[in-house]
Amino acid sequence: MRLLLAIMGVLLVAQPVGADAFEEHDYILNCSGCHRMDGSGSRAVPSLLAMPELNGKPGAREYWIQVPGAAQAPLSDARLAALMNWLVERFTEKRPKPEYTAQEVGQLRRNPLRDPIAKRNELRQAPYRRR
Amino acid sequence: MSRLDRWFEGMTRQSARRVSRRNWLSRFGGVLIGGAALPLLPVARAAEKHTVGEDGVKGREGDPTRCEYWRHCAIDGFLCSCCGGSHTACPPGTEMSPVTWIGTCRNPADGKDYIISYNDCCGKTFCGRCMCNRNEGERPLYHWYRNNDINWCGGAKSQSYSCSTAIVVKVAEEAQPEK
């Protein structure tokens, strides 16, 4: 009986993790069509595998939300924030610190980039933030 | 060997004595028609639900050469299964584009929604057979993140579009919004 209760307890705790995880679903449906399943991109679309290059540079965190693909994705601010936390961790192996919130994402996507490619080149040449 | 011969001879003579030709004909006819009618029984239909397709997705395969096939719910193009390929493979001489239009479709066999990737096959002139333009979940061009009218062959070596596949990626967490 005790064992059964313990198993039920474990199942109850384990359940919500799978049920609420939309990150991979949202990635496949909203990003992978162009960036591809493995993030490697194509001729016209930048590779997400290059994200570590910008990680830690001032402005990169904001840039990743302001790029057209993220800012204009048909997702709520909360879902986009969750997706981007997951995506940054997947491609840079570091979870954003602090994590994106729906509020921050909402403000950034209302402030779109005029020229995303120029911004990326600018970030590439910028020095890393001193710690 | 002679034993088998004798046994067979005995059987033949016995059946010739016992069974009339008309009786045999009527029974044989019964087996033919009965066998053909068996798949119409509800038992046989229920068993079909448990068949598994070539890519491991459960459910009656249906006919991938038809526009009504469940995976084609968001497609816009010629079906590769009518063009020398299949719904998961490109015809010979074409290349599958790495960038692709993605949507979700409900599989009637298990009632689940699946993410479907409509990879285009590129490198030959357009196939011209089995045009299918269902576009469920698609939005007009000004809503370009949900529009499939761009040439997805942009990511392939050749830009000429030939036909479209419908590949199951995985089970969807939710159906595509705004169907």
Image: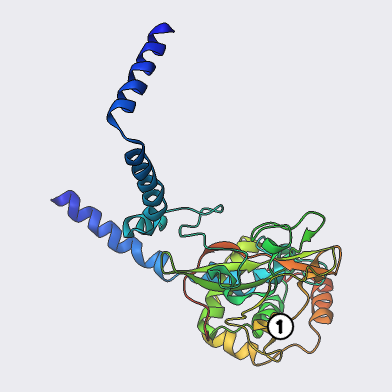
Q: Is residue B80 above or below residue A4?
A: below
Residue positioned 43% across, 64% down in the render = B109
| Whether residue A90 is visible | yes
Amino acid at dot 1: Pro
Based on the displayed image, in which of its 4 quarters is residue B160 positioned? bottom right
State the residue in front, A63 or B107.
Answer: B107
Q: Which chain hosts label 1?
A: A
Figure label count: 1
Residue positioned 29% across, 59% down in the render = A11
Q: Residue furthest left?
A: A1
Q: Residue furthest top?
A: B2
Image location (x, y in percent) of residue B45: 38, 59
The residue beneath circle 1 is A68
| Whether residue A56 is visible | no
Q: Is residue B96 above or below residue A64?
A: above
State the residue in front, A129 or B51.
Answer: B51
Q: Is residue B46 above or below residue B143?
A: above
